[in-house]
Amino acid sequence: MDFLRKKIDKLKPQFTKGGKFEKLQSVFEGFEAFLFVSDKVTSKGSHIRDSIDLKRTMTVVIIALVPALLFGCYNTGLQHFRSVGTDPALFQAFWFGFIKLLPLIIVSYVVGLGIEFIAAQIRGHEINEGYLVTGLLIPLIMPIDVPLWMLALAVAFSVILGKEVFGGTGMNVFNPALLARAFIFFSYPGWMTGDNVWTEGLTKGVNVIDGYSGATPLSMLATGDVSNLPSFMQMFVGTIPGSVGETSVIAILIGAAILLITGVGSWKIMLSVFAGGIGMGLLLNAVSVNEYMELPFYYHLAMGGFAFGAVFMATDPVSGAQTERGKWIYGFLIGVLSVLIRVLNPAYPEGVMLAILLMNVFAPLIDYYVVQANIKRRLKRAKVTLNTGVK
Amino acid sequence: MSNQEKEPILSAKNLKLLTEPLGRNNPITVQVLGICSALAVTVKLKPALVMALSVMIVTGFSNLIIASLRKFIPDRIRIIVQLVVIATMVILVDQFLKAYVFDVSKQLSVFVGLIITNCIIMGRLEAFAMANKPWPSFLDGIGNGAGYGLILVIVAFFRELLGSGTIFGYPVLERLGIYGTGYENNGMTILPPMALIIVGLIIWVQRSRDKSLVEKK
């Protein structure tokens, strides 16, 4: 450690103002703060210190994502081996999936962090950790077979146009990870919908055995193929085709527990998203004019990206609602809209992404009305006391 | 008065009327007018170009006519008079397009008729033609129409190239063999949101090159 410290101190003058690499100051600071605690101290005023800063918060989310990531690796391998008709050992499946997922993660981080570093240099800001979570979320919500250049383009789109133009980390209107997914969904629909993209190798069609279908439960339902639907238990455990990290509800619930115990994720948003989904599911059950509507409401919570979206996307503290009452409304509407889009709009089999992006837009409006209502209520109370005072 | 009449046809002042809307006073990127049709007709270059020319002609000639009539138009009914002039011009353009480029006219469909409601034209009539002589007004109209058209063509160029892989219908990317490398056309560029994003990017580039356009905080 002493050795590193000395090296950094020796390099430092070159990166400060007037030094040789003045322009790369924030890169240097980024690395220094990554290795050591920043030596900057505030000089004036009183400050509240909390050990939970942005970096620690992000680390907790990364840890919470690990179960979904590990299961995603395993399931990617499992689905592939099933499609060629073999039954893999646990580690064999995991390793196969890991090797396939690694390029996606690398591309996501290299492109995203690259842009963040450049943007920080241009602005003279320090480098933020905001992309650390986004960079891992993006591969987890992609189909495993997505071409890498498309992924790179989507990451560039979401980081530049979804985040940097609004002012960088903490200023974005939309969830950047979902924006990347939406970009591919609308730009290259062939790679984000259909039955072949969710299992590695199916698009190339090599050695695929007869009778294997790569269809996700949602696309089965959208095409009215209800009889082949996997059981609720299969969906809950997650051994079904789908985006890398979204299939296993168990893994996601472990992540949710980590987020809730550490207080990083909002339990209000999570709970209300599920409540909204259940409410809408029950309502559709009551109407039930077709097979999709008759589907038991709890299926919706386990299918597709509902759980993943509720736990990791809706709880994004930047793009979600900020006020406590606003969080209930925000989350509930996400749940309602997700199920509504799924069932009633056959063009979009997965509604969670669109529902969260839509509510991201409305979050500031919800907050505005919650704050205004609060002001009005308190003004009223003030008036009442004034009246009694006059009496 | 006599001094002004000697002014050359394309004096520096008049030239400025023509060129300024192309750059630092562009109707779309600076005044943010006429956005709706910029999103609608820019999927392909050919209709965008035809639309650009149509708007140029309509703005130019309605400016000319209104500027010639400006002393006789009663102030209280000026909007109605302006509308009649614009509508006449639009119908002429529409009939012309139907007669000579029927396929493009069909693609543009309702948007030729909707030139009447294009804010740029009404804006130029109110802001310029009502207070200036016919010749400068005509130049101002042509300039603003061209400024609108320029952005339309730039947006359409990117949307057609990235969305369909063609330029004026010629399959450029296919001839270059780019699809062989696994490249695919971007479906989102065909949808209206991407037109808005491209207009936004043009505004971004323009403002970073010309800092005087950036509002002071």
Image (cartoon, coloured by chain):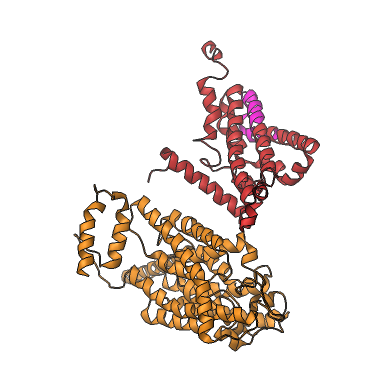
Residue A309 on image: x %, y %:
52, 74
Closest to the observer, A358 or A109: A109
Extreme-right residue of the structure: B99
Percent from the top left, x then y, of residue A178?
A: 52, 66
Residue at left offset 52%, top offset 40%: B31
Please tell me in which quadrant of the rendered image residue A185 appears: bottom right
Magenta-drawn stretch, dominant element (helix, strand or loop): helix
Position of residue A215 relative to residue B198, above or below, is below
Q: Is residue A331 toward the left or the right of residue A126 in the image?
A: right
> Quadrant of the image for the C terminus of chain A?
bottom left
Residue at point 23%, 56% (across, down): A12
Residue A293 percent location from the top left of the image = 68, 80
Q: Position of residue A59 (x, y in %)?
A: 37, 73
**A325 is higher (above) or lower (below) than A286:** above
Give the residue furthest to the front.
A207
Report which colour depicts chain A. orange
Is B179 in the magenta?
A: no
**Foreground: A1 or B52?**
A1
**In magenta stretch: residue B69:** yes
Q: Residue at x 63, y 35 (%)?
A: B79
Viewer-closest of B167 and B101: B167
Residue shown at the point (51%, 35%) measured from the top left:
B23
Relative to A273, is B38 above or below? above
Q: Is residue A320 visible?
A: no
Q: Is residue B92 visible?
A: yes
Total labels: the figure holds 0
The stretch of residues the image draws in magenta is B59-84
Rendered hue of chain B is red
Q: Quadrant of the N terminus of chain A?
A: bottom left
